Image (cartoon, rainbow, N blue to C red):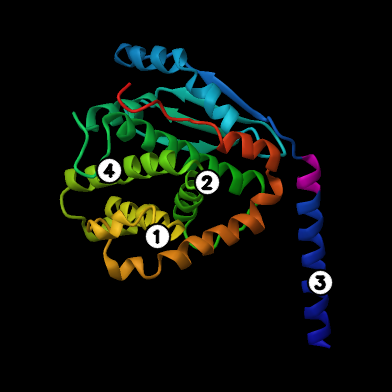
């Protein structure tokens, strides 16, 4: 008797979840991303505001996210964050802080690094990745995507996976810029304390290795230098193909049904970064 009741409860739950997913899918539509350049309160951020507005930064991000079918509108805005160099998603709104962009500008290298990361890649790569990371949080919420493990890790993985669907050279530039930003952040900090490991994010060093691993796992040949030049330990590299395939499978099962493939192909075939040296 107990078994029959339990089976009935499970079947009912599956039916309800399936109905909710179907309802969400039917309500979802492409082109549901809106944008807003909020004028900064801090005069020091005015040049950032004007530069990004002149370059249609949010419009480009809006176009990049346009193939995703969403059940309701998602707002992406540039705004001041009271001195916090941050970016975050909350209640259908992604906020990219001027302070975070200012931080990237202040930490980018003066010239191309030995790893081949240019100043512009060290700025635009992490910024693009951060926008996709917060967009991942939005998808998990709005599409009711189940997440096993820490959501921040899942958002990192989804962002990296999407980046790796770009043209190879553009993906290499973004991945290099992201790894540089995490490495720079790790080098600027004192050795981590025990309480730092209690945070919802991985440490900067862990996040750097994770992004390098998923890139290497996606294409051993193209990203082979990551291991050959010692940026990623060989022991970790042994599992990277599996890690990439795991993320790819999750994407196909949970996110892909909400993506307009025709629009997505056009988006991924477009060049998004400024040419190097400009």
Q: Is residue 9 visible?
A: yes
User: Relative to 67, is 75 above or below?
Assistant: above
* Residue bearing mark 4: 180
> Outermost residue toward the left?
190
Q: Is residue 25 magenta?
A: yes
Q: Residue at x 30, y 24 (%)?
A: 277
User: Residue 141 location, x and y as percent?
Assistant: 61, 46
Contact between marks 3 and 2 (CB within 8 A): the answer is: no
Q: Residue at x 44, y 55 (%)?
A: 153
**SS label for mark 4:** helix
Residue stretch rendered in magenta on the structure: 23-27
**SS label for mark 2:** loop
**SS label for mark 1:** loop
Label 4 vs label 3: CA separation? 48 Å
Which quadrant: the C terminus?
top left
> Does 116 sit left or right of 81 as displayed?
left
Labels 1, 2: front one: 1
* Residue bearing mark 2: 165
Label 3 vs label 1: CA separation? 43 Å
Mark 1: few/some/many CA within 10 Å (<14, 14-19, 20+)? some
The label on residue 11 is 3
Labels 1, 4: front one: 1
* Residue bearing mark 1: 220
Q: Is residue 40 visible?
A: no
Of callouts 4 and 3, the N-terminal one = 3
């Amino acid at each position: 008797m107990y078994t029959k009741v339990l089976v009935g409860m499970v079947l009912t739950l599956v039916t309800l979840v399936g109905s909710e997913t179907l309802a969400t899918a039917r309500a979802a539509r492409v082109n549901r991303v809106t944008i807003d350049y909020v004028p900064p309160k801090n005069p020091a951020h005015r040049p950032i505001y004007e530069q990004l507005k002149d370059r249609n930064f949010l419009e480009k991000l809006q176009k990049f996210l346009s193939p995703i079918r969403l059940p309701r509108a998602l707002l992406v805005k540039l705004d001041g964050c009271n001195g916090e160099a941050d970016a975050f998603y909350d209640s259908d709104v992604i906020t990219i802080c001027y302070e975070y962009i200012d931080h990237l500008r202040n930490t980018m290298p003066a010239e191309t690094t030995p790893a081949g990361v240019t100043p512009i890649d060290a700025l635009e790569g992490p910024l693009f990745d951060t926008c996709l990371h917060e967009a991942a949080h939005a998808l998990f919420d709005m599409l009711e995507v189940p997440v096993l493990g820490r959501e921040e890790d899942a958002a990192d993985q989804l962002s990296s996976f999407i980046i790796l669907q770009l043209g190879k050279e553009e993906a290499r530039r973004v991945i290099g810029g992201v790894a540089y930003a995490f490495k720079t952040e790790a080098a600027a900090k004192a050795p981590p304390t025990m309480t730092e490991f209690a945070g919802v994010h991985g440490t900067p060093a862990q996040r750097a290795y994770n992004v390098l691993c998923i890139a290497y796992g996606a294409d051993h040949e193209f990203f082979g230098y990551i291991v050959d030049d010692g940026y990623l330990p060989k022991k970790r590299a042994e599992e990277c193909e599996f890690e990439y395939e795991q993320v790819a499978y999750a994407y196909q099962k949970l996110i892909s049904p909400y993506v307009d493939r025709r629009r997505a192909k056009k988006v991924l075939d477009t060049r998004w970064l400024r040419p190097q040296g400009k």
